[in-house]
Amino acid sequence: MIELRPTPQQERWLAAAVQLKVRNHPWIAQRSGGWSSPSYIARCAFFVLGLAACGLSAAAFEIVLKPWALFGAGVTLLVVAEWLILRKHLFHAGVEEALWTGGLLMVAIHFVPSNRELGLALAVALVLALAAMRLLNAFLLTLALAAASVAIDLAGGHRLVGESHVAIASGVFCYAAGATALLLARMEFLRPSHDHMLAWPMVIMPLCGFLWLAAQLSPAIRIATGLASGIYALTALILGIRRRSHAPLLACMASLGCIAYQLRDLTPLPLKLKLILWGSVALLAALGLDRYLRTARRGITSRQIGGGSNALDLLQIYAAAALSPRSSPHVAEQFKGGGGTGGGGGADGTY
């Protein structure tokens, strides 16, 4: 029987092996069903190599099969990617993701006229969404949603920057996509990749929505954007604490950065004074939160758990050593053990 992807249990074993850095252990290989997944750094490297292979394949087919170069190269890349997945049991290895996505993009671009910007944006969004569903890739899903926001902008005015109502539609779509991912993340999924496919949009899409609306000069739009980021940040913070999840907390911090950017013109102070003022406020808030979480709140605490070494501990030791009093160098030179300057009492002949 041909397996299109690992079972949920096998995927959980793969995720545990990556976290514990025991991917090549026979005990893990037996429970993962022969599927293999490299480390994150290796996955990124293989993805880049896969993109290079896509470019070389397109160039080769351009020489051999010029009218149908993209179509031929795309079909070939799709076949190779599926072979790597089905026969070699590669899962989230990077190379098969790049080949599959690049091949499908080439096939789609072959049938879409180059002068149809809206059609091209829709094709890219659809291809990325299909690739994300097939490969269970959170990054590709986020790119698909971003491409869909570009298609919305092109459908409204055929320009990426300019008309306010077009930017509003794209920004609302991005905020809605992030909020949907934030609400759906309360569900329990069997696959870790499904959690990642919700975690990436809930962090990235509100930033995309903010970027669509941050360039608008209308005070009403800027105020509405700041309020939307504030509401999203508060909601993500509450849900992140309740669920004890990192992704909503990261989304909260990203939205707080958007709010800070919107408040840059709140005071007419120079830039250096603004950085000092708001940096001090952020530092005080961080210290207050750290002190508040010294007592565990719903299982979350700022105290270090376990006795492992920490970079802050090393920094404290270094600071203590730097502040400790030292003997004067000339005092140490004047001291002569045993009455002489040598290693023993008068060993150098000086008494």
Image (tube, rainbow, N blue to C red):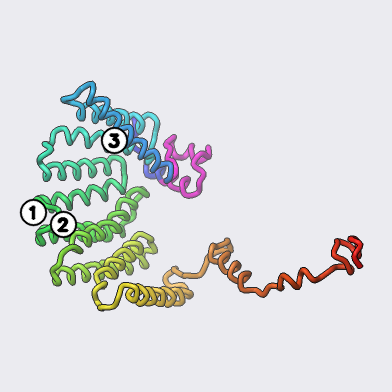
Q: Amino acid at mark 3?
A: Trp
Label 1: state its secondary structure: helix
User: Which quadrant would the N terminus be assigned to in this image?
Assistant: top left
The percent position of residue 233, horizontal first and vertical second, equals 29, 68
Nearer the N terminus, badge 2 or badge 1?
Answer: 1
Answer left or right for 293 relative to 342: left
* Pointer 2 local density, CA inside 10 Å: few below 14, some 14–19, many at least 20: many
Nearer the N terminus, badge 3 or badge 1?
Answer: 3
Query: In front: mark 3 or mark 1?
Result: 1
The residue that disc 2 covers is 170
* Whether residue 48 is situated above or below residue 71 in the rendered picture: below
Label 3: state its secondary structure: helix
Residue nearest the viewer, comparing 67 with 192 = 67
Q: Magenta residues?
A: 12-39
Extreme residue toward the left, this view: 157
Query: In front: mark 3 or mark 2?
Result: 2
The residue that disc 3 covers is 100
Q: Determine the residue positioned at 41% across, 46% down.
A: 12
Q: Give the spatial CA distance, label 2 vs label 1.
A: 9 Å
Determine which of the numbered discs, if any, sits on residue 156 in the image: 1
